[in-house]
Amino acid sequence: MTSKIIHVAVGVILRDQQILLALRSSKQHQGGKWEFPGGKVEDGESVQQALSRELHEEVAIDVTHSQAFMQIEHAYPEKTVLLDIYLVSGFTGEPHGREGQPLRWVTIAELSNIDFPDANQPIVERIQQHFSKQQGS
Ligand SMILES: Nc1nc2c([nH]c(=O)n2[C@@H]2O[C@H](COP(=O)(O)OP(=O)(O)OP(=O)(O)O)[C@@H](O)[C@H]2O)c(=O)[nH]1
Ligand SMILES: [Mg+2]
C-alpha cells in the first residue's frame, strides 16, 4: 500500500484549567466525535503556522502562546495520521465554531468521559498526567 501519512496540527487549548473541544461533523472522518481543534499541515507550512491558521479558521482565535506537547502516529483502517499536538496556553478572541460545529469547555478530569477518535486516548492520558504533576508539585 502506498498511503501517505497525514500530518495534523492539533491544539489543546487551555483557559482557566479547562480545555476546548469541538464536535466533528457527521460528514468528516471520525464524525460525531469530539476533537481538539486543528487540521492538516499544508505544503510549505510549519506545524505552528498550520496550528495558528487552523485555529483561526475553525474556532476564530489567534494563538499567542503555544508549546509542542507530543506526537502520535495512529493507523486507522482507511488512513494513517501523525497528530502533532501543541498546548495552547495563550490566545486572543472568544472561541466560536466558525464552521457551525458545537464547542464545549471541559475540565481535565472530564476528558476521561469524552467520545474522542481512537488516536486520542494517549493524549488524554498525557494531559491528565501532566496537570496532576503540576498541581502536586
Ligand atoms: N483536528 C483533529 N483531528 C484529529 C483528532 N484526532 C484524530 O484522529 N484526528 C484526525 O486527523 C485528521 C485530520 O484532521 P481534520 O479533519 O481536522 O483536518 P482539516 O481540519 O484540515 O479538515 P478538512 O480535511 O475538512 O479540510 C482526521 O482524519 C481526523 O480524524 C483531533 O483530536 N483533532
Ligand atoms: Mg480540522
Image (cartoon, helix red, strand yellow):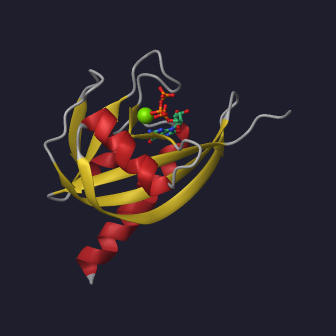
- Left or right relative to 1: residue 77: left
Q: Is residue 89 left or right of residue 115?
A: left
Q: Residue at x 73, y 39 (%)?
A: 4
Residue at 58% in and 53% down: 72
| Ligand 2 placement by image quarter | top left
**Above or below, 116 relative to 51:** above
Percent of width and height locating residue 45: 52, 50
The x and y percentages for residue 111 are: 33, 47
Tell me what residue is drawn at x 38 percent, y 60 percent.
Answer: 127
- Residue sitting nearer the eye, 1 or 127: 1
Percent from the top left, x then y, of residue 96? 19, 33
Horizontal side of 105 relative to 75 (left or right) equals left
Question: Residue 74 at what x, y percent from top left?
Answer: 64, 45
Q: Is residue 92 visible?
A: yes
Is residue 107 in view? no
In the rendered image of this protein, does residue 114 appear above or below residue 98? Answer: below
Give the camera-side residue of 124 and 21.
Answer: 21
Q: As drawn, which residue projects farthest toward the bottom?
A: 137
- Toward the right, the furthest residue is 1
Give the residue drawn at x 24%, y 49%. Answer: 62
Nearest the camera: 125 or 11?
Answer: 11
Q: What residue occupies the far front of the structure in this picture?
A: 44
Quarter of the rendering containing residue 71: bottom right
Quadrant occupied by the C terminus: bottom left
| Tally of marks | 0
Give the quadrant of residue 126.
Answer: bottom left
Quarter of the N terminus within the rendering? top right
